[in-house]
Amino acid sequence: MSEFAYYTEEGLKKLKDELYDMKSVQRPMISEQIAEARDKGDLSENAEYDAAKEAQGLLEMKISKMEELLSKARVIDNSTIDNSKAFILSTVSIKNVSNGMEMQYTLVAESEADLKAKKISVDSPIGRGLLGKKVGEIADIQTPNGIMQFEIVEITR
């Protein structure tokens, strides 16, 4: 895996918004739950206190991971990307060699992947297989059912 994680501007904003929510909404809410549980007396047999402390630990771990992810995040300027090969943010039209079925996907970062929106991760088997390919090339992609071949029909931004 590379040192950096690449995102679109909206993908990076979504991550930052999620981190902001964890720090400014969820963290104070859990602190309040801990304070309320503490006010109920004996902490040694206080299930509410234990649950709130556990939730706090999980949240802090999520915040830490998100901050690390954001420290490695870079925004992609797709105007500088070579259009002759499939890269992140490329929209790639592919044709299944065995049945002729055509599909179109946009290659995105893992956190932005959304199959319904036809956005697949560059870390997925298909995404990895398409990276660096040119129009006319065949991508051999390992699937649970064996190797599938896809011809690159078109690459756009």
Image (cartoon, rainbow, N blue to C red):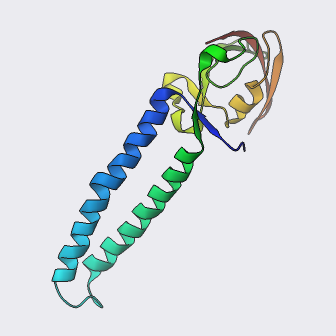
Q: Position of residue 77 (x, y in %)?
A: 59, 21
Q: Nearer the viewer, residue 103 or 38?
A: 38
Q: Position of residue 148 (x, y in %)?
A: 78, 26
In this view, 22 is above or below 1 = below
In this view, 39 is above or below 28 = below
Q: Position of residue 26 (x, y in %)?
A: 30, 56
Q: Quadrant of residue 29?
A: bottom left
Q: Nearer the viewer, residue 109 or 144?
A: 109
* Count of residue discs: 0
Please report the residue visible at 50 percent of the width from the left and 52 percent of the height from the top: 67
Instruction: Specify whether 19 is left or right of 1.
Output: left
Q: Is residue 103 among what the camera can see? A: no
Q: Is residue 131 among what the camera can see? A: yes
- Image quadrant containing the C terminus: top right
Please report the residue visible at 21 percent of the width from the left and 78 percent of the height from the top: 37
Instruction: Specify whether 121 is left or right of 135.
Output: left
In this view, 112 is above or below 25 = above
Please report the residue visible at 27 percent of the width from the left and 88 percent of the height from the top: 43
Q: Quadrant of residue 153?
A: top right
- Image quadrant containing the N terminus: top right
Instruction: Specify whether 118 is left or right of 13.
Output: right
Please report the residue visible at 68 percent of the width from the left and 13 percent of the height from the top: 101
Q: Nearer the viewer, residue 121 or 64?
A: 64
